[in-house]
Image: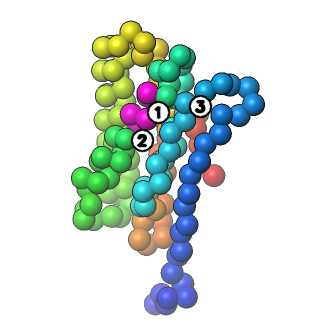
Amino acid sequence: MKTAKDALRLYAAGGTHTGYVRERNEDAFLVMLPLLAVADGVALPDGGGVASRMAVETLERRVRASRGATQDVPWAHSFLLAAIDWAHGLIRIQRSEEEMCAKMSTTIVAAIILPDQHAVIAHAGDSRAY
């Protein structure tokens, strides 16, 4: 039997940094427990920034719409796969409709922290979670 002493406490925050090589930051992140996500935009001039924002905004909308859903490992797995796939579809549409965004893309890594202290992590591209 778990006690209050055994409860998991999670503190989450996010931030980005342009770094020392690039002039622009094309990253986007989401800290909206139980969902955490980081997207790293690829392509210039601004397409990567558009793609990374679209990816995390799509995940945010999907998690808001799913409030109250049973949160277990199978649900989280299905949720992340569907949400990332949905974001990919929206980004592909944007690429085909706007010349500036024709080469935009993003990587993404996302995690859902479940009430039973499990985490489900998904990624697309070379982003990774530690």
Q: Is 15 positioned to the left or the right of 97 in the image?
A: right
Q: Amino acid at mark 3?
A: Asn
Q: Nearer the viewer, residue 57 or 72?
A: 57
Q: Nearer the viewer, residue 23 or 79?
A: 23
Question: Which residue carries the number 2 mark?
Answer: 56
Q: Main secondary structure of the magenta part?
A: helix
User: Marks 2 and 3, how far apart in space?
Assistant: 15 Å
Work out whether mark 2 precedes mark 3 in sequence or the reverse, and give the earlier one. Answer: 3
Question: Which residue carries the number 3 mark?
Answer: 25
- Disc 2, SS: helix
53 falls in the magenta region: yes
Query: Residue 20 at x, y = what percent?
Result: 75, 31
Q: Are marks 2 and 3 in contact (CB under 8 Å)?
A: no
Task: Name the disc covering residue 52, or none.
Answer: 1
Q: Are marks 2 and 1 in contact (CB under 8 Å)?
A: yes
109 falls in the magenta region: no
